[in-house]
Image: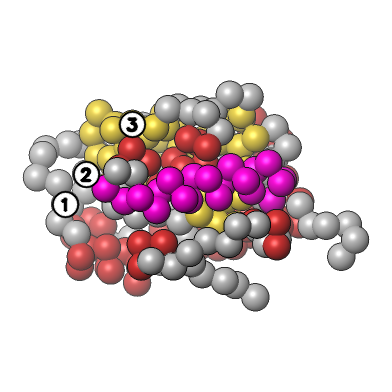
Amino acid sequence: LWTSIDLSAGEELPEDPSGFDCIIVTGGPMGVYDADTYPWIHDELSFVRRAIDRRVPLFGLCLGGQLLAAALGADVHRHDHHEIGWWPVRLTAAARDLHCWSHMPDEFTAMMWHGDTFHLPPDTIHLASSAGCARQGFATADGRVIGVQYHPEFDMTDVRRLLDVNELPHTSSQWVSTVEDIGRGHEHADTGRTLWWEMLDRFLEMHQDPRD
């Protein structure tokens, strides 16, 4: 059973996050530093911190990963450039020690759509990097909180939706693909989604309540 909460549409978070088996914090076009423009960011950060304190498993995707990094005390800021398109991601050796990443190939191609980056929160494991962004993922030592910068969850319907409602940045960058190249990512999307669902299954397995 999944529950979806859209804060940008005015929906509200519950006070107590401990009723969830797992919380996935998703993306958006805004930044963590835009809380004055989007006041719900304050609410989401508070909710995430409460979830961390109560040891609820959390997985953050793109902006979601940045929110988790910020909640754990890391700096989140504008990157030197945008990274948009299908780009290779390489795992660190440390990622292999985490059960929900042990099935991942050493390198895979993932969908990127971001102009921000995060520093690694204190006492976390660096999971992955790309040529255009050194910090593509992190995890707390117990693997209970994981944030990634790339989009493991996107299929081509998601990608086309992004292309329909967003313009690519007008600034020239080697890390921004063309619309045509982005639209040819079917194989990467299919592979990425398979890896994502396996990762999520393993993540839930890692943190399943032994009383269940």
Q: Is residue 34 above or below residue 156?
A: above
Report the front residue among 135 and 72.
72
What secondary structure is marked by label 1?
Answer: loop
CB within 8 Å, label 3 to label 2: no
Label placed on residue 77: 3
Q: Residue furthest bottom?
A: 1
Q: How many marks?
A: 3
Q: Quadrant of the C terminus?
A: bottom right
Report the mark closest to the observer, 3 or 2. 3
Is 54 one of the magenta-colored residues? yes
What secondary structure is marked by label 3?
Answer: strand
CB within 8 Å, label 1 to label 3: no
Report the mark closest to the observer, 1 or 3. 3
Q: Which residue is mark 2?
A: 176
Residue 76 image offset from top left, x and y in percent: 39, 32
Please tell me how crowded label 3 is: few (under 14), some (14-19), or many (20+) other residues with Cα within 10 Å.
some
Picture quadrant where residue 87 is located: top left
Q: Of marks 2 and 1, which one's residue comes earlier in the chain?
A: 1
Label placed on residue 168: 1
Residue 205 image offset from top left, x and y in percent: 76, 57
Residue type indicated by callout 3: His
Q: Residue at x 16, y 52 (%)?
A: 168
Q: Real-space Cα distance between discs 1 and 3?
A: 20 Å
CB within 8 Å, label 2 to label 1: yes
Report the front residue among 11 and 162.
11
Please tell me how crowded label 1 is: few (under 14), some (14-19), or many (20+) other residues with Cα within 10 Å.
some
In the image, taking residue 79 as reference, residue 6 lies left or right, namely: right
Residue type indicated by callout 2: Val
Report the mark closest to the observer, 2 or 1. 1
Residue 86 visible in this rendered orientation of the protein:
no
- What colour scheme has been applied to the protein in the rendered image? secondary structure
Q: Of marks 3 and 2, which one's residue comes earlier in the chain?
A: 3
